[in-house]
Amino acid sequence: MLILNKSSIKTVLFLVLFSAGCINLQALNLNQTNKLTDKELKLNNPNSPHSFIFQEQQIHTPDDTIKDKTAPPTETKQADEFTVPAQMANETFVFQINSEISYLKFSHFVLNTSKQIFVQAWSREKELAQISMETDSLRKIYGHSPSEEKEKIASVILKNEEKSVALNQEIPVLYQKARDEEDRYWKSASSEDLLQFRKKIDLYRDSLASINLKKQEQATAQMEAAIDTLVVFEEQMKSQEQKQEASSEIIYKIQIAAYKGKIPEPANKLIKKLSVIRKVENYIDEKGVKVFTTGHLRIYNEAVTLQNQVKLEGAKNAIIAAYQNGKRITVNEARKLNNEL
């Protein structure tokens, strides 16, 4: 009977322990279930800070055709690209970014912001040039304007000068800002990117040089053609002048120099200087003197006016010379023949 009781007690104890283990296991499962449920609730709650994980990610399967929503959308560069105004698009310039890089046109800019800032500075510079031209024109007409208009003109000039001062201060700041932004970009760029960009600039510079060379060649050809035309025209004019002189007309010229033998260097420089702004002719008279003249006038008073102008231009000893049928006569004789006395 005692033995039986001991066996019964062991059995009861075993059953008690087993029951306690099952209860703990159920409690553990229930706890895990509650935790999962809590997590799911948080994830499905749009106000939860963790909700974006399930909202923005998709589970991919072999048949899944839905793309990952977390992948960044493809950027459309053209949508954000700053467009240079049409009147500026083909402009060329030299804008130095640093010791290694210079831009030659607007498309060389890498950043939209700096390109936009540069265009602003460029536009301001054009505006400043326009204001300067307008102000210069106003200054010229100010002295010849009536008193009631002078005050208005002076007011406009003052406003233009104020604008010019403001623009002169603003333009360098804008250029420097654009330069700094581009410089920061290139400082962080790879050496390969720098090398490729330099090659691009060199190619463009070579193409510009080729275009300029062709333009120079065309301009030279046009100039040579113009010179040929001018020579023919001058010959025709000289022929007409000779015909006019042959018709006993009196011609006044301004003699700027006359030398026999070697021409002194100061006189030679003066003759060259006047030749730039006036037509200077020369001939050797019957005494072997080389005479330099300018002008071809038929009225004595006009000759006096030209003489004064030539003196102001440096020919202090300029005199009036008179000619009849190509032969030199005295000024008094010419004035008598022209009925100018």
Image (cartoon, rainbow, N blue to C red):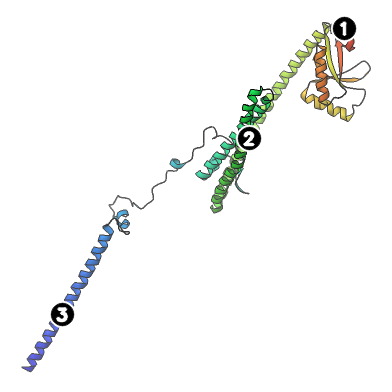
Does 192 appear above or below 321? below
Q: Nearer the viewer, mark 2 or mark 1?
A: 2
Q: Nearer the viewer, mark 3 or mark 1?
A: 1
Secondary structure at badge 1 equals helix
Percent from the top left, x then y, of residue 50? 32, 59
Q: Nearer the viewer, residue 299 or 37?
A: 299
Would you say residue 170 is visible in this rendering?
yes
Labelled disc at residue 336: 1
Find disc 2 in the rendering and name its residue.
161
Percent from the top left, x then y, of residue 318? 86, 21
Q: What amino acid does circle 1 point to?
A: Lys
Q: What amino acid does circle 2 point to?
A: Glu
Mark 2 and mark 3 lie on one chain; the one further toward the N terminus is 3
Q: Nearer the viewer, mark 2 or mark 3?
A: 2
The structure residue drawn at horizontal position 61% and vertical position 27%, both measured from the top left corner, is 152
Find disc 3 in the rendering and name its residue.
18
Secondary structure at badge 3 equals helix
Percent from the top left, x then y, of residue 70? 35, 53
Horizontal arrangement in the rendering, residue 58 relative to residue 166 (left or right): left
The structure residue drawn at horizontal position 87% and vertical position 30%, both measured from the top left corner, is 266
